[in-house]
Image: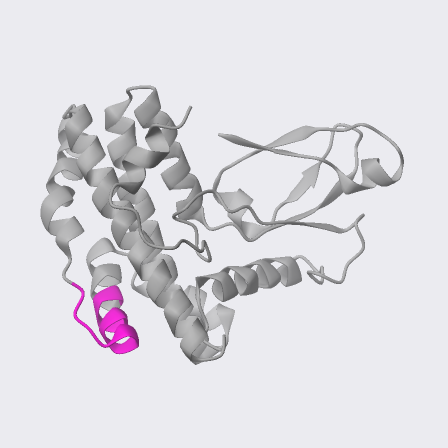
């Protein structure tokens, strides 16, 4: 998968440039990139990984690649849980190095799930009933380990239920933000701080450096993105997204 960009330096110089960057692990660490005219700069990316995974799931479903769709959906769900945990850690520790080290110590699905369930209960004052793992982890495991070919209906059910949960949690964060006068530290804050952290490690001040050093990028990929404001959570969000041409 690749993401398209315009080079700000080219625009300032009156050049017409359009280039692509591969979306890989480094992409989420604000990498140094080079446009087709040779300009190099830091691409300060604050779009979360799960946004891309859910977007890829939609595209794979449209292509009838249901195995890939299942893997992208479940990976996106687990990535969201990890970011949720990281957000709470950062709000308490206020030290991204400590957050990164802590995440390495709990970097297993069951540990992330345990941390998520605990934080969710503390933050929202209610118990998280892990219906996604109960209903859909077996299908994901069969696809990944046994080469199982899921049906269109299994993909749709998984997609609707995962995205509904994600969007409900996003809404809870928005409600907390409103109630606190927008002082609640949320996933948007975390992804901004993550971007600043990776830029500073490369010796660049995010939001301060000139365009020949850093170019900011943040993309709201869909209704499942943090900060997406909706009148209500739709009943079948994955069906809505996959039905769009």
Q: Residue furthest front?
A: 231
Q: Residue 20 lies in what quarter of the image?
A: top right
- Residue ID at (26%, 42%): 74
Image spot of residue 188 (x, y percent): 49, 61
Query: Majority secondary structure of the magenta segment?
Result: helix
Residue 125 on the magenta span: yes
Residue under the image location 67 percent in, 40 percent down: 33
- Answer whether residue 205 is visible to the viewer in this image: yes
**Quarter of image, res 72:** top left
Q: Position of residue 111 (x, y in %)?
A: 23, 62
Q: Quick one: 11 or 19, which is closer to the camera?
A: 11
Residue 234 lies left or right of residue 178; in this view the side is left
Q: Is residue 193 rendered magenta in the image? A: no
Q: How many marks?
A: 0
Q: Who's the residue at 52% across and 48% down the image? A: 28
Q: Nearer the viewer, residue 54 or 38?
A: 54
Q: Residue furthest right?
A: 13
Question: Which region of the structure is painted magenta?
Answer: 116-128
- Give the answer, above or below, for where 128 lies relative to 141: below
**Which image quarter holds the C terminus?**
top left
Q: How is the image coloured?
A: one colour
The spot of residue 83 in percent (x, y) is: 38, 59
Q: Residue at x 21, y 67 (%)?
A: 117
């Amino acid at each position: 998968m690749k993401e398209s960009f315009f080079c700000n330096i080219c625009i300032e110089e009156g050049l017409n440039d359009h280039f692509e960057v591969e979306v890989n692990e480094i992409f989420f660490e604000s990498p140094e990139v080079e446009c087709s005219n040779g300009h190099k700069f830091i691409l300060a990316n604050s779009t979360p990984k799960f946004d891309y995974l859910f977007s890829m799931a939609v595209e794979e479903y449209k292509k009838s690649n249901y195995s890939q769709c299942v893997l992208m959906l479940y990976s996106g769900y687990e990535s969201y849980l990890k970011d949720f945990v990281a957000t709470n850690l950062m709000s308490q520790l206020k030290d991204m190095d400590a957050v990164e080290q802590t995440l390495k110590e709990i970097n297993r699905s069951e540990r992330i799930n345990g941390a998520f369930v605990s934080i969710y209960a503390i933050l929202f004052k209610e118990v998280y009933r892990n219906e996604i793992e109960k209903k859909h982890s077996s299908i994901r495991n069969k696809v990944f380990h046994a080469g199982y070919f899921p049906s269109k209906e299994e993909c749709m059910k998984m997609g609707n239920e995962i995205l509904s949960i994600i969007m409900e949690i996003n809404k809870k964060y928005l409600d907390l933000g409103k109630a606190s006068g927008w002082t609640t530290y949320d996933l948007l804050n975390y992804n901004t701080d993550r971007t600043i952290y990776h830029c500073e490690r490369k010796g660049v001040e995010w939001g301060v450096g000139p365009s020949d050093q850093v170019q900011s990028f943040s993309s709201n990929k869909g209704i499942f993105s943090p900060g997406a404001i909706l009148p209500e959570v739709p009943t079948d969000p994955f069906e809505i997204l996959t039905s769009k041409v």
